[in-house]
Image (spheres, grey):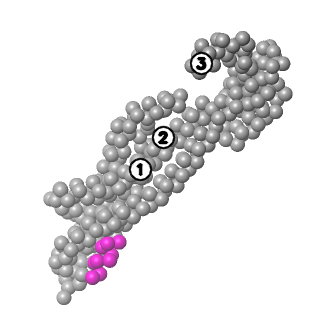
């Protein structure tokens, strides 16, 4: 009866495993606390390494948002033939505005076009000496910014064939260059992220290797008393996780600080292109991605290093 009572009071396997994990967590946190300078330096290096791809990804997302706003500033000018009077031109503008994919179509008479040219060109006094108005009437067409690029091109190609239109002007080369640059930056971010992930693995692996060497005698003693490799490996894995976690926190803080620092400059640059832009920081998905990647890299770096060096440490 007493024997069965003693057996029933022993902790279960899951309880012992949970207790081992709690002890490993407490021990690794105490070790990192006892060496704050080296811990901070390692976490800072990891944070900078993680902040670079996170910052590039945030910059790419802001550029993509800004390009969508710039797409809304894209306009085509349809210069009408001299035979088209004001009433016919205004009616044509109303018909174009009803087309699918057109956000706005605004008719400017020859007099209105001349007035706008004087106001914005800086040649107002020179134009005053002309006897006749040299400018044709024009319809300014603004496409729906939500349309794909191919549909916008097809729309403008159709408008060019209208019998009332003499010629058209659409300056979108700069926008196409922007899209090409964004695609290049996106691929560069993927490449840089892969290289920096490898750098994080190396940093954490080297740190764990030094920790293993400093605790070689302790590992030998643990093996002598029958400790398994999983038991010995556990504290080092938690150390890798803590380094990754600290690096992720620092990376998010660095990216947020950079966003605040560059916000005013970004607004001024967007204003030069007639657009409004507000730098947004890391999204919730990006923050989760940074923390997930940091924890995974920390665990992988520690596991890879411990697996390589633990088998080489055996009692004499």
SS at badge 2: helix
- Residue at the spot 56% in from the left edge and 50% down from the top edge: 183
Say the numbered circle drawn on residue 54. Answer: 1
- Residue at the spot 53% in from the left edge and 28% down from the top edge: 274
Say the numbered circle drawn on residue 62. Answer: 2
Q: Which of marks 3 and 2 is nearer the N terminus?
A: 2
Q: Badge 3 is on which residue? A: 123
**Quarter of the figure that contains the N terminus:** bottom left
Quadrant for residue 260, please give it: top left
SS at badge 1: helix
Q: Give the range drawn in magenta.
A: 304-312
**Quarter of the figure that contains the C terminus:** bottom left
Q: Whole-Å distance between the Cαs marked 2 and 1?
A: 12 Å
**Horizontal side, residue 309 vs residue 287: left or right:** left
**Horizontal side, residue 226 vs residue 132: left or right:** left
Say the numbered circle drawn on residue 269. Answer: none
Q: Residue 141's spot in the image, x, y percent?
A: 69, 27
- Sort mark 3 into few (<14), some (14-19) or many (20+) by Cα contacts within 10 Å: few
Q: Earlier in the sequence, mark 3 or mark 1?
A: 1
**Which of labels 3 and 1 is toward the front?**
3
- Sort mark 1 into few (<14), some (14-19) or many (20+) by Cα contacts within 10 Å: many
Please, what is the dominant secondary structure of the magenta stretch? helix
Asked if the residues shown at circle 3 and circle 2 are in contact, with their CB atoms under 8 angstroms apart, the answer is: no
Asked if the residues shown at circle 3 and circle 1 are in contact, with their CB atoms under 8 angstroms apart, the answer is: no
- Residue at the spot 40% in from the left edge and 55% down from the top edge: 292
Which residue is at the far left?
A: 34
Asked if the residues shown at circle 2 and circle 1 are in contact, with their CB atoms under 8 angstroms apart, the answer is: no
């Amino acid at each position: 009866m007493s024997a069965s009572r003693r057996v029933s009071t022993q902790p279960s396997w899951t309880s012992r495993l949970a207790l081992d994990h709690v002890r490993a967590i407490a021990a690794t946190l105490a070790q990192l606390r006892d060496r704050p300078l080296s811990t901070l330096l390692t976490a800072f290096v990891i944070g900078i390494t993680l902040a670079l791809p996170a910052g590039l990804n945030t910059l790419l997302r802001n550029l993509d948002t800004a390009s969508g706003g710039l797409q809304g500033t894209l306009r085509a000018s349809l210069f009408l033939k001299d035979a088209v009077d004001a009433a016919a031109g205004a009616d044509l503008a109303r018909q174009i505005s009803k087309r699918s994919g057109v956000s706005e179509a605004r008719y400017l008479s020859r007099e209105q076009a001349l007035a706008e040219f004087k106001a914005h060109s800086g040649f107002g006094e020179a134009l005053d000496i002309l006897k006749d108005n040299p400018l044709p009437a024009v319809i300014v067409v603004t496409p729906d910014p939500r349309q794909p690029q191919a549909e916008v091109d097809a729309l403008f190609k159709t408008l060019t064939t209208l019998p009332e239109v003499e010629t058209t002007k659409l300056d979108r080369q700069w926008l196409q260059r922007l899209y090409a640059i964004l695609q290049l930056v996106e691929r560069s971010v993927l490449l840089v992220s892969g290289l920096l992930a490898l750098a994080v693995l190396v940093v954490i692996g080297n740190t764990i290797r030094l920790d293993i060497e400093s605790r070689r005698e302790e590992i030998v003693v643990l093996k002598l008393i029958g400790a398994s490799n999983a038991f010995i490996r556990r504290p080092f894995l938690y150390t890798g996780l803590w380094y990754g976690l600290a690096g992720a926190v620092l990376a998010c803080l660095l990216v947020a600080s950079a966003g605040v620092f560059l916000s005013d400059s970004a607004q001024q640059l967007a204003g030069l292109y007639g657009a409004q832009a507000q730098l947004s920081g890391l999204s919730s998905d990006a923050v989760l991605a940074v923390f997930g990647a940091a924890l995974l890299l920390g665990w992988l770096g520690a596991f890879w290093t411990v697996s390589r060096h633990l088998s080489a440490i055996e009692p004499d």
